[in-house]
Image (spheres, rainbow, N blue to C red):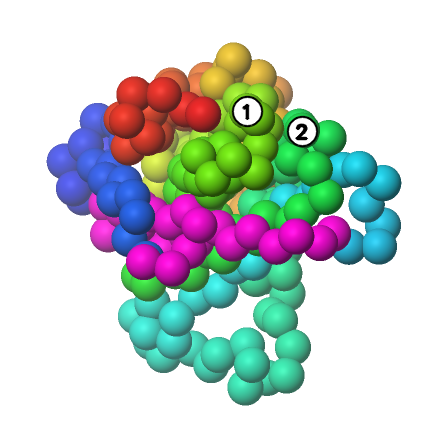
Amino acid sequence: MTREDGRAFHELRPVTITTDFIKFAEGSCLIQCGDTMVLCCASVEDKVPPHVPFGEGWVTAEYSMLPRANRERSRRDVSKLKLSPRSAEIQRLVGRSLRSAVDMRRLGERTITVDCDVLQGDGGTRTASVTGGFVALALACRKLVQDGDLASSPIRHAVTGVSAGIVEDTPMLDLRYSEDSRAQVDLNCVMNELGELIEIQGTGEGRAFTPAEQQELVRLCAKGCEELLAAQKKALGGKLK
Protein backbone atom coordinates (compact mmCIF):
# COMPACT_ATOMS: atom_id res chain seq x y z
CA MET A 1 0.00 0.00 0.00
CA THR A 2 0.99 3.65 -0.48
CA ARG A 3 0.47 6.29 2.20
CA GLU A 4 -1.85 9.15 1.25
CA ASP A 5 0.78 11.82 1.84
CA GLY A 6 3.51 9.91 -0.01
CA ARG A 7 5.66 9.22 3.06
CA ALA A 8 7.65 6.04 3.48
CA PHE A 9 6.34 3.74 6.21
CA HIS A 10 9.20 4.73 8.54
CA GLU A 11 8.94 8.51 8.00
CA LEU A 12 7.63 11.18 10.36
CA ARG A 13 5.37 13.94 9.15
CA PRO A 14 7.15 17.32 8.85
CA VAL A 15 7.76 18.71 12.36
CA THR A 16 8.02 22.40 13.26
CA ILE A 17 8.46 23.75 16.80
CA THR A 18 8.05 27.50 17.27
CA THR A 19 9.19 28.66 20.70
CA ASP A 20 8.00 31.68 22.74
CA PHE A 21 4.67 31.54 20.96
CA ILE A 22 2.83 33.08 23.92
CA LYS A 23 4.08 36.31 25.49
CA PHE A 24 3.18 35.77 29.14
CA ALA A 25 3.92 32.08 29.76
CA GLU A 26 7.24 31.19 31.40
CA GLY A 27 7.74 28.73 28.54
CA SER A 28 5.72 28.12 25.40
CA CYS A 29 5.81 26.61 21.94
CA LEU A 30 3.58 25.69 19.04
CA ILE A 31 4.35 22.22 17.75
CA GLN A 32 3.16 21.19 14.30
CA CYS A 33 3.34 17.56 13.20
CA GLY A 34 1.88 17.51 9.74
CA ASP A 35 -1.60 18.97 10.15
CA THR A 36 -1.68 18.42 13.91
CA MET A 37 -1.03 21.62 15.85
CA VAL A 38 -0.71 21.83 19.65
CA LEU A 39 -0.02 24.94 21.72
CA CYS A 40 2.03 24.10 24.83
CA CYS A 41 2.44 26.61 27.67
CA ALA A 42 4.35 26.08 30.93
CA SER A 43 3.40 28.14 33.99
CA VAL A 44 5.35 28.34 37.26
CA GLU A 45 3.77 28.75 40.69
CA ASP A 46 5.60 29.00 44.03
CA LYS A 47 3.50 26.33 45.71
CA VAL A 48 2.98 22.58 45.52
CA PRO A 49 0.05 20.21 46.06
CA PRO A 50 -0.36 18.75 49.60
CA HIS A 51 0.85 15.28 48.56
CA VAL A 52 4.30 16.49 47.45
CA PRO A 53 7.14 15.70 49.91
CA PHE A 54 8.73 18.63 51.75
CA GLY A 55 11.41 20.38 49.71
CA GLU A 56 10.31 18.94 46.38
CA GLY A 57 8.49 20.38 43.39
CA TRP A 58 5.79 19.07 41.08
CA VAL A 59 5.13 18.95 37.34
CA THR A 60 1.66 18.39 35.97
CA ALA A 61 -0.21 18.81 32.70
CA GLU A 62 -3.63 19.69 31.34
CA TYR A 63 -4.90 18.75 27.88
CA SER A 64 -7.85 19.95 25.85
CA MET A 65 -9.02 20.25 22.27
CA LEU A 66 -10.54 23.41 20.85
CA PRO A 67 -14.10 22.91 19.58
CA ARG A 68 -13.04 23.03 15.91
CA ALA A 69 -9.77 21.16 16.27
CA ASN A 70 -11.50 18.27 14.50
CA ARG A 71 -13.65 17.83 11.44
CA GLU A 72 -16.82 18.49 13.43
CA ARG A 73 -17.31 20.81 16.38
CA SER A 74 -16.93 19.20 19.80
CA ARG A 75 -18.31 20.62 23.03
CA ARG A 76 -15.90 22.27 25.42
CA ASP A 77 -15.26 20.27 28.57
CA VAL A 78 -16.42 23.22 30.66
CA SER A 79 -19.83 23.04 29.00
CA LYS A 80 -20.13 19.43 30.20
CA LEU A 81 -19.03 20.43 33.73
CA LYS A 82 -16.37 17.71 33.71
CA LEU A 83 -13.27 16.66 31.81
CA SER A 84 -13.93 14.11 29.09
CA PRO A 85 -12.50 10.64 29.86
CA ARG A 86 -10.24 10.89 26.82
CA SER A 87 -8.82 14.29 27.86
CA ALA A 88 -8.31 13.07 31.43
CA GLU A 89 -6.44 9.97 30.25
CA ILE A 90 -4.24 11.96 27.88
CA GLN A 91 -3.31 14.65 30.38
CA ARG A 92 -2.30 11.98 32.90
CA LEU A 93 -0.02 10.48 30.26
CA VAL A 94 1.52 13.87 29.47
CA GLY A 95 1.98 14.66 33.16
CA ARG A 96 3.67 11.34 33.90
CA SER A 97 5.94 11.74 30.89
CA LEU A 98 7.05 15.27 31.80
CA ARG A 99 7.59 14.42 35.48
CA SER A 100 10.07 11.76 34.40
CA ALA A 101 12.20 14.56 32.90
CA VAL A 102 12.61 16.60 36.09
CA ASP A 103 14.57 16.25 39.33
CA MET A 104 11.89 17.39 41.77
CA ARG A 105 14.32 18.21 44.59
CA ARG A 106 16.30 20.51 42.32
CA LEU A 107 13.06 22.13 41.17
CA GLY A 108 12.28 23.05 44.77
CA GLU A 109 8.88 23.87 46.21
CA ARG A 110 7.21 25.09 43.05
CA THR A 111 4.77 23.65 40.53
CA ILE A 112 5.10 23.79 36.76
CA THR A 113 1.83 23.21 34.92
CA VAL A 114 2.05 22.49 31.21
CA ASP A 115 -1.16 23.27 29.30
CA CYS A 116 -1.50 21.46 25.98
CA ASP A 117 -4.29 22.84 23.80
CA VAL A 118 -4.95 21.17 20.48
CA LEU A 119 -5.61 23.81 17.83
CA GLN A 120 -5.95 21.25 15.05
CA GLY A 121 -6.03 17.49 15.32
CA ASP A 122 -4.96 15.07 12.61
CA GLY A 123 -3.74 12.17 14.72
CA GLY A 124 -0.96 12.00 17.30
CA THR A 125 -2.18 14.84 19.52
CA ARG A 126 -1.12 13.14 22.76
CA THR A 127 2.39 12.41 21.56
CA ALA A 128 2.75 15.90 20.07
CA SER A 129 1.69 17.23 23.48
CA VAL A 130 4.50 15.26 25.15
CA THR A 131 7.11 16.43 22.63
CA GLY A 132 6.01 20.06 22.62
CA GLY A 133 5.25 20.01 26.33
CA PHE A 134 8.85 19.13 27.09
CA VAL A 135 10.07 22.14 25.10
CA ALA A 136 7.76 24.47 27.03
CA LEU A 137 8.88 22.84 30.30
CA ALA A 138 12.57 23.22 29.43
CA LEU A 139 12.06 26.89 28.55
CA ALA A 140 10.30 27.52 31.88
CA CYS A 141 13.17 25.86 33.76
CA ARG A 142 15.67 27.88 31.75
CA LYS A 143 13.87 31.08 32.79
CA LEU A 144 14.04 30.05 36.45
CA VAL A 145 17.81 29.78 36.10
CA GLN A 146 18.09 33.06 34.17
CA ASP A 147 16.05 34.86 36.84
CA GLY A 148 18.27 33.51 39.60
CA ASP A 149 15.56 31.36 41.18
CA LEU A 150 17.51 28.16 40.49
CA ALA A 151 21.25 27.56 40.36
CA SER A 152 20.89 25.05 37.53
CA SER A 153 18.18 23.47 35.44
CA PRO A 154 16.31 20.59 37.09
CA ILE A 155 15.84 18.91 33.70
CA ARG A 156 17.35 15.41 33.80
CA HIS A 157 16.68 14.38 30.21
CA ALA A 158 14.43 15.19 27.27
CA VAL A 159 11.26 13.24 26.54
CA THR A 160 9.56 12.72 23.19
CA GLY A 161 6.49 10.84 22.06
CA VAL A 162 5.30 9.39 18.76
CA SER A 163 2.77 6.88 17.48
CA ALA A 164 3.07 3.86 15.24
CA GLY A 165 0.50 1.40 14.03
CA ILE A 166 -0.41 -1.43 11.73
CA VAL A 167 -2.66 -0.51 8.81
CA GLU A 168 -3.62 -3.21 6.30
CA ASP A 169 -1.03 -5.47 8.00
CA THR A 170 1.71 -2.88 7.36
CA PRO A 171 3.65 -1.33 10.29
CA MET A 172 4.03 2.43 9.87
CA LEU A 173 5.25 5.42 11.87
CA ASP A 174 3.38 8.56 12.94
CA LEU A 175 -0.18 7.89 11.88
CA ARG A 176 -2.35 10.71 10.62
CA TYR A 177 -6.08 10.53 11.34
CA SER A 178 -7.04 8.79 8.10
CA GLU A 179 -4.55 6.02 8.95
CA ASP A 180 -5.24 5.91 12.68
CA SER A 181 -9.00 5.61 12.16
CA ARG A 182 -8.56 2.33 10.29
CA ALA A 183 -5.50 0.97 12.08
CA GLN A 184 -5.63 -2.65 13.17
CA VAL A 185 -3.08 -1.91 15.87
CA ASP A 186 -2.28 1.46 17.47
CA LEU A 187 0.72 2.11 19.70
CA ASN A 188 1.89 5.29 21.42
CA CYS A 189 5.41 5.42 22.76
CA VAL A 190 7.22 7.90 25.04
CA MET A 191 11.02 7.72 25.34
CA ASN A 192 13.82 9.73 26.90
CA GLU A 193 16.93 11.00 25.16
CA LEU A 194 18.85 7.86 26.17
CA GLY A 195 16.44 5.78 24.11
CA GLU A 196 14.83 4.32 27.23
CA LEU A 197 11.10 3.68 27.38
CA ILE A 198 8.92 5.79 29.67
CA GLU A 199 5.51 4.56 28.58
CA ILE A 200 3.90 2.39 25.92
CA GLN A 201 0.19 2.36 25.13
CA GLY A 202 -0.64 -0.38 22.63
CA THR A 203 -4.05 -1.61 21.56
CA GLY A 204 -5.21 -4.27 19.14
CA GLU A 205 -8.16 -2.32 17.81
CA GLY A 206 -8.85 -4.44 14.73
CA ARG A 207 -6.97 -7.61 15.64
CA ALA A 208 -4.56 -9.03 18.16
CA PHE A 209 -0.85 -8.48 17.55
CA THR A 210 2.24 -10.50 18.31
CA PRO A 211 5.21 -9.61 20.53
CA ALA A 212 7.32 -9.44 17.35
CA GLU A 213 4.91 -6.90 15.84
CA GLN A 214 5.01 -4.88 19.05
CA GLN A 215 8.80 -4.83 18.93
CA GLU A 216 8.71 -3.66 15.31
CA LEU A 217 6.38 -0.80 16.25
CA VAL A 218 8.64 0.16 19.15
CA ARG A 219 11.63 0.17 16.79
CA LEU A 220 9.75 2.54 14.48
CA CYS A 221 8.89 4.76 17.45
CA ALA A 222 12.53 4.79 18.60
CA LYS A 223 13.57 6.06 15.19
CA GLY A 224 10.86 8.72 15.29
CA CYS A 225 11.74 9.81 18.82
CA GLU A 226 15.38 10.22 17.85
CA GLU A 227 14.35 12.59 15.06
CA LEU A 228 11.95 14.46 17.36
CA LEU A 229 14.78 14.85 19.87
CA ALA A 230 16.80 16.59 17.18
CA ALA A 231 13.84 18.92 16.49
CA GLN A 232 13.58 19.73 20.20
CA LYS A 233 17.28 20.46 20.43
CA LYS A 234 17.10 22.76 17.41
CA ALA A 235 14.11 24.60 18.87
CA LEU A 236 15.94 25.05 22.17
CA GLY A 237 18.99 26.61 20.54
CA GLY A 238 21.19 23.53 20.40
CA LYS A 239 20.86 22.40 24.01
CA LEU A 240 18.08 20.61 25.87
CA LYS A 241 18.46 22.31 29.27
Instruction: Say which mark, if any, is on residue 106.
Output: 2
Q: Is residue 21 above or below residue 185?
A: below
Residue range highlighted in magenta: 23-48
* Circle 1 Cα neighbour tier, 10 Å, few/some/many (<14 / 14–19 / ≥20): some
Q: Nearer the viewer, residue 131 or 208?
A: 131
Residue at the left extreme? 6
In the rendered image, the quadrant that contains the C terminus is: top left
Q: Nearer the viewer, residue 6 or 26?
A: 26
Q: Dot 1 lies on which element?
A: loop
Q: Which residue is mark 1?
A: 152
- Amino acid, disc 2: Arg
- Amino acid, disc 1: Ser
Q: Is residue 141 visible?
A: no
Instruction: Name the residue: 36% across, 55% down.
Output: 39
Q: Is residue 66 above or below residue 240?
A: below
Residue 122 percent across, percent down from the top left: 32, 54
Q: Is residue 111 above or below residue 121?
A: above
Residue 206 percent across, percent down from the top left: 52, 46
